[in-house]
Image: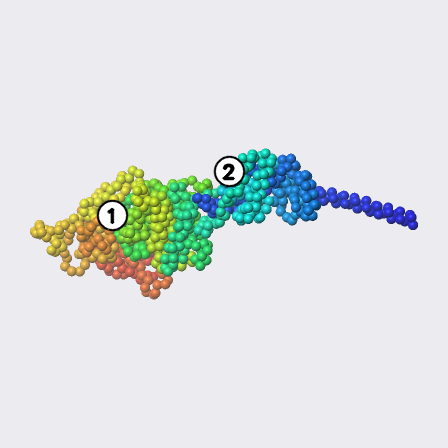
């Protein structure tokens, strides 16, 4: 029995020894696991720093970043900040290896005495370990954090540990890091904080929610704890009695900056800046404190203008509007209204319409004219014809033709036919490439995809792209990137037009008289100071545009329907131009006294000459109207106007006066001699041609000094005018003046040789016709039209006829009857 008990005792002892050995092994392994875990976590990591974006004047716009905000690196920690932080968080920071045994013992005794956790022993390094790897507070985690803290201190050193702590520690309201907290709460860089401000901020991390600076109770708690920090700094001799008294006084009166909220007037802008400042993963972080170029007060006023204007246009089908305002000093964006209301779901208000590609109408024409001037395809005195539909039957919405036009008038009146003809003269590919240089497209489609539509804005372009391109006109030919925030990376300014061409286009667009007769004076494009302005309307009135600039500001406006539905005849002149004028008036509010010089400069080295707008030649004493035009010295016309002549007329009969006409019946009348190609236009304008119409012939007027045939239009003695409106300035007598011995030439003006035309599938049967037009150099009574070698119809002046179309290839010829005088054949394919 005794032996048995002895054996049992030995067995129990053996098991205990085995259990002890196993426990030791487990403990060692557990210790190793905890150590390995702690060592593996011994890295200083932080999220990407947040960019804090403010408008001019300091108004908060947006904090760029995901999740909590801040994490601004400090670099060198200011001594005061370091002293205050160590005094309240880790008094023996400079002496322990990352874990403070004294603090652990003190906390253990206090917690045992209280029977609950009333004190902690976490050092700054241990807090870093916990913030980088958050989780439930257990003894195991405490051990891992302690090991990690020791490894972090050994690996990085105390200065890096303190800097990292001050970068990631929370300060409430999702704010991390003292540098970011100083900017948000106190609007100061951390280097400029006073003792009171440092103590206030250093108090918050202990309990960020309870010491929320935006809550009065939380702010009061932070002030109380801040006094404790100041007292600790006084006890340790870091600050003197005077400093302590002053800091305590300031702390009691410390004010926190108002909470920054994303302004409702700049929601699209905030989202845009957020996108711009989010750098790709792995890239160098962007600027931390960003000052936007936006003037928030101006932004709010422009938005209110947009909302009021849109309310007036809703009945006409307008659904939304967008506005960009650019300060030409550096091309800084001062206001960007993406829609009339971000939260208006019915109008798709959350869409930023400054970024949506739409068809821009005539707002591209100035670039076409600028390029043509640069390439010397035209000069300021070149006559551009607006007398018949252009290629593809392009014409204007008013279905009018204004006759011979200088570039100034053709552009200011936004005529489509001269623009399309100019596109053909410059070259489709060259214009398309130029538009790519301006950033208006990325060449995703070839030029032929858009064809003649390029001249009249049939390319989808956003308001932002359009306004950026217009900086080239507003700044004298140099293309700039739009600047949205200070320090923004931009491409180098690029000259895309000569200064002379850009200035000429500016002078064309800023001449209110040149816009007559299409755009009336004192309308939406009229300003009390010089402004270059161009409107545009897309097909079907789906989009209305205006771009306008003074010598200080550039404004772009879009109005349209979010669902691309047509508006009810609401074009750029009637909508977008009104809003653009209101915005520019606001921008130049201080200039209304007329004391500022806002005029646009003429091209350097150019000279001004009086030009006849009908002929493009130097004006004579009988030319009326007359325009003062700037041009290079080498482009000054060598001849005077041959079109205006003054003839003595017998006022009793209206015929040319003779030597026998009594003096009291002799009157001097001015006659206009127009080249033959204007015959059809003149007749369409209601100007009958004498000598080719039935009835007894009247005595012909004296021939003008011209060797070729011309139309002669008698004019009354009109008062000064700025543009020839055929329906008002020309009266009722037109005649042919023939130069003797000049051979007759017949030219088919439409259709053009080699054209491919599409038949309208919606036209009723028998109603689809093609206009056949011809010009004759000398007066003839009739022309005979041939179609595919077969006589079709004999027509009188102005020799136009409509032919019922049929598919296939056809050949047209116009012939003077009973002669061998005929035009060159024109081949056309109809599909």
How packed is label 2: few (under 14 Cα within 10 Å), some, or many (20 or more)? few
The answer to whether residue 66 shows anywhere in this view is no
The residue located at (62%, 43%) in the rendering is 127
The answer to whether residue 341 shows anywhere in this view is yes
Secondary structure of residue under mark 2: helix
How many numbered tags mark residues here? 2
Q: Are marks 2 and 1 in contact (CB under 8 Å)?
A: no
Q: Kindly identify which residue carries mark 1.
A: 613
Could you say which disc has been placed on residue 805 in the image? Answer: none
Query: Could you tell me residue 295's position as x and y percent?
Result: 42, 46
Q: Nearer the viewer, residue 604 or 423?
A: 604
Query: Could you tell me residue 558's position as x and y percent?
Result: 39, 52
Q: Viewed as shown, does residue 112 lie left or right of 755?
A: right
Marks 2 and 1, how far apart at CA: 67 Å
Q: Is residue 809 above or below residue 260?
A: below
Q: Closer to the N terminus: mark 2 or mark 1?
A: 2
Q: Viewed as shown, does residue 652 lie left or right of 37?
A: left
The residue located at (37%, 62%) in the rendering is 761
The residue located at (32%, 41%) in the rendering is 500
Q: Residue 503: which quarter of the image? A: top left
Q: Kindly identify which residue carries mark 2.
A: 192
Secondary structure of residue under mark 1: loop
Q: Nearer the viewer, residue 713 or 667?
A: 667
Q: Viewed as shown, does residue 314 lie left or right of 824?
A: right
Query: Could you tell me residue 627's position as x and y percent?
Result: 24, 46
How packed is label 1: few (under 14 Cα within 10 Å), some, or many (20 or more)? many
In the rendered image, the residue lying farthest to the bottom is: 765
């Amino acid at each position: 029995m005794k032996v048995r008990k002895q054996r049992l005792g030995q067995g129990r002892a053996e098991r205990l020894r085995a259990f002890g050995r196993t426990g030791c092994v487990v403990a060692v392994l557990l210790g190793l696991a905890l150590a390995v875990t702690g060592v593996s976590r011994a890295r200083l990591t932080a999220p990407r720093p947040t960019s804090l974006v403010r408008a001019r004047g300091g108004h908060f716009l947006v904090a760029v970043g995901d999740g909590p905000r801040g994490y601004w690196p400090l670099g060198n920690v200011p001594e005061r900040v370091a002293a205050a932080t160590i005094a309240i968080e880790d008094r023996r920071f400079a002496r322990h290896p990352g874990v403070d045994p004294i603090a652990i013992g003190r906390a253990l005794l206090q917690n045992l005495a209280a029977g609950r956790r009333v004190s902690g022993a976490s050092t700054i390094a241990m807090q870093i370990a916990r913030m980088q790897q958050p989780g439930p507070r257990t003894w195991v985690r405490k051990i891992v954090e302690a090991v990690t803290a020791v490894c972090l201190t050994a690996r990085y050193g105390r200065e890096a540990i303190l800097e990292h702590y001050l970068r990631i520690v929370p300060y409430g309201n999702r704010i991390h890091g003292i540098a970011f907290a100083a900017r948000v709460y106190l609007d100061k860089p951390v280097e400029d904080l006073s003792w009171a401000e440092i103590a206030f901020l250093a108090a918050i991390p202990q309990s960020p929610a309870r010491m929320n600076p935006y809550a009065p109770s939380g702010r009061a708690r932070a002030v109380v704890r801040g006094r404790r920090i100041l007292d600790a700094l006084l006890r340790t001799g870091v600050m003197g009695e005077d400093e302590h008294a002053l800091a305590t006084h300031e702390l009691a009166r410390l004010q926190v900056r108002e909470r920054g909220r994303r302004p409702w007037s700049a929601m699209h802008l905030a989202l845009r800046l957020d996108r711009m400042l989010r750098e790709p993963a792995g890239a160098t972080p962007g600027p931390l404190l960003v000052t936007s170029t936006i003037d928030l007060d101006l932004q709010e006023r422009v938005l209110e203008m947009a909302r009021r204007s849109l309310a007036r246009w809703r009945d006409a089908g307008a659904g939304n509007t967008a506005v960009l305002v650019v300060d030409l000093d550096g091309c800084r964006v001062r206001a960007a209204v993406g829609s009339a209301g971000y939260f208006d779901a019915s109008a798709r208000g959350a869409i930023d319409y400054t970024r949506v590609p739409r068809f821009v109408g005539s707002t591209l024409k100035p670039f076409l004219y600028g390029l043509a001037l640069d390439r010397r395809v035209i000069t300021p005195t070149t006559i551009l014809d607006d007398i018949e539909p252009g290629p593809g039957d392009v014409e204007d919405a008013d279905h009018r033709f204004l006759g011979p036009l200088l570039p100034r008038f053709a552009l200011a009146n936004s005529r489509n036919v001269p623009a399309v003809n100019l596109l053909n003269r410059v070259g489709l590919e060259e214009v398309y490439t130029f538009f790519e240089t301006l950033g208006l497209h990325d060449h995703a489609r070839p030029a032929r995809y858009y064809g003649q539509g390029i001249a009249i804005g049939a390319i989808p372009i956003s308001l932002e792209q359009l306004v950026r391109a217009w900086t080239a006109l507003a700044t004298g030919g140099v293309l700039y990137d739009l600047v949205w925030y200070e320090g923004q990376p931009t491409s180098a300014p690029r000259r895309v037009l000569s200064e002379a061409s850009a200035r000429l286009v500016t002078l064309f667009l800023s001449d209110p008289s040149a816009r007559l007769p299409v755009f009336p004076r004192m309308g939406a494009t009229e300003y009390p100071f010089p402004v270059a302005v161009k409107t545009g309307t897309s097909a079907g009135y789906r989009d209305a545009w205006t771009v306008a600039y003074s010598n200080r500001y550039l404004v772009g406006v879009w109005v349209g329907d979010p669902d691309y539905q047509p508006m009810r005849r609401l074009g750029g002149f009637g909508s977008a131009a009104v809003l653009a004028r209101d915005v520019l008036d606001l921008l130049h509010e201080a200039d209304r006294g007329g004391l500022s010089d806002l005029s646009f400069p003429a091209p350097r080295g150019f000279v001004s000459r009086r030009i006849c707008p009908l002929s493009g030649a130097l004006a004579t004493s009988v030319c009326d109207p007359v325009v003062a035009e700037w041009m290079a010295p080498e482009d000054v016309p060598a001849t005077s106007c041959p079109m205006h002549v003054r003839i003595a007329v017998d006022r009793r009969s209206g015929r040319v006066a003779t030597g026998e006409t009594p003096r009291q019946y002799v009157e001097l009348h001015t006659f206009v001699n127009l080249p033959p190609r204007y015959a059809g236009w003149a007749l369409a304008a209601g100007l009958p041609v004498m000598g080719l119409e039935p009835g007894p012939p009247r005595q012909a007027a004296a021939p003008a000094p011209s060797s070729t045939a011309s139309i002669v239009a008698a004019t009354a003695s009109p008062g000064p005018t700025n543009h020839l409106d055929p329906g008002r300035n020309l009266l009722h007598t037109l005649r042919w003046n023939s130069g003797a011995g000049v051979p007759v030439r017949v030219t088919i003006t439409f259709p053009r040789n080699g054209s491919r035309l599409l038949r309208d599938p919606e036209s009723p049967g028998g109603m689809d016709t093609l206009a056949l037009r011809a010009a004759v150099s000398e007066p003839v009574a009739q022309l005979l039209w041939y179609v595919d070698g077969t006589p079709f119809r004999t027509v009188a002046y102005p020799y136009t006829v409509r032919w019922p179309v049929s598919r296939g290839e056809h050949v047209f010829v116009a012939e003077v009857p009973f002669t061998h005088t005929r035009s060159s054949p024109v081949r056309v394919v109809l599909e």
